[in-house]
Image (cartoon, rainbow, N blue to C red):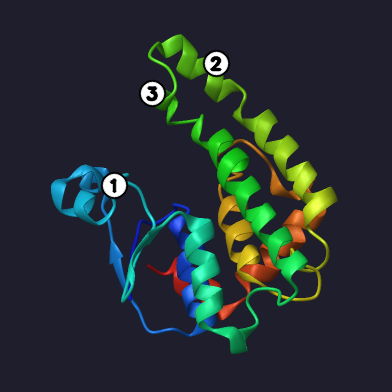
Amino acid sequence: MELFHSSGTVAVASLIALHEADLPFTATAVDFTTAEQRGAPYLRTNPKGRVPALVCDHGILTETPAILAYIATLAPARNLAPSDPFEYAKMQEFHSYLASTVHVNHSHRMRGPRWASAQSSFDDMASKVAQNMTECFELIQSEYLKGPWVMGDQYTVADAYLFTVTNWLKGDGVDVNTLPRIAEHFAAMHARPAVQKALSY
């Protein structure tokens, strides 16, 4: 397998998951500083021009929730996803919330041209990011983070996803220490060897 990624992006979650699963893969960096993600070679891999993209024997997967679910399924002995169907769906609910709401709120800080054309609109969106991200993480802390890990006592790929998004909070103007359970999770994740490997790329 080959994972296309870029440092500091949501693709870090997939890197963590691949290391946790102990699956063989090649990590290929996409240089956002030169807009490599918009060049024709990469667009043949992912026409969306974003990361991550996972190339495997069956084809190409994009979108973090799909990639994380696939990785967990490939390594069942690692118990990276709940075996109970309802709990698995709850994990996917959490992934969907991170993808559809939290990530979008974060993107309003520097991706305003995706939604508007005027600088005043960009500035207005950016001014709301800290508040919106705080509210999202307060909800995660109270409703989704069940116990030392997202799914309770079982570490899953959801923890890689939460860690990756939590890592954006400082840049978004949110002090993670105002969210004590999120801060504990963030520190516990930092201590995991798979996380250290993923952050080294």
112 vs 186, left or right, is: left
Marks 3 and 1, how far apart at CA: 16 Å
Image disc number at residue 32: 1
Which residue is tagged 2?
124
Q: Which residue is drawn at 70% across and 61% down?
A: 89
Foreground of the two, 197 or 106 = 106
Residue 115 as seen in the image, left or right of residue 152:
left
Horizontal placement of 79 versus 148: left or right?
A: left
Relative to the observer, which residue lies in front, 182 or 11?
11
Viewer-side label of 3, 1: 3
Tell me which residue sits at (50%, 30%) in the image: 109
In this view, 4 is above or below 155: above
Name the spot of residue 82 as percent of width and height, x first: 71, 74
Q: What residue type is labelled 2?
A: Asp
* Classed neighbour count for the residue bearing mark 1: other residues with Cα under 10 Å, few (<14), some (14–19), many (≥20): some
Residue 137 location in percent, x, y? 73, 44
Query: Which mark is in front, 2 or 3?
Result: 3
To which residue does mark 3 refer?
113
Give SS at disc 2. Answer: helix
Question: What's the mark number on residue 51?
Answer: none
Determine which quarter of the picture holds residue 3. bottom left
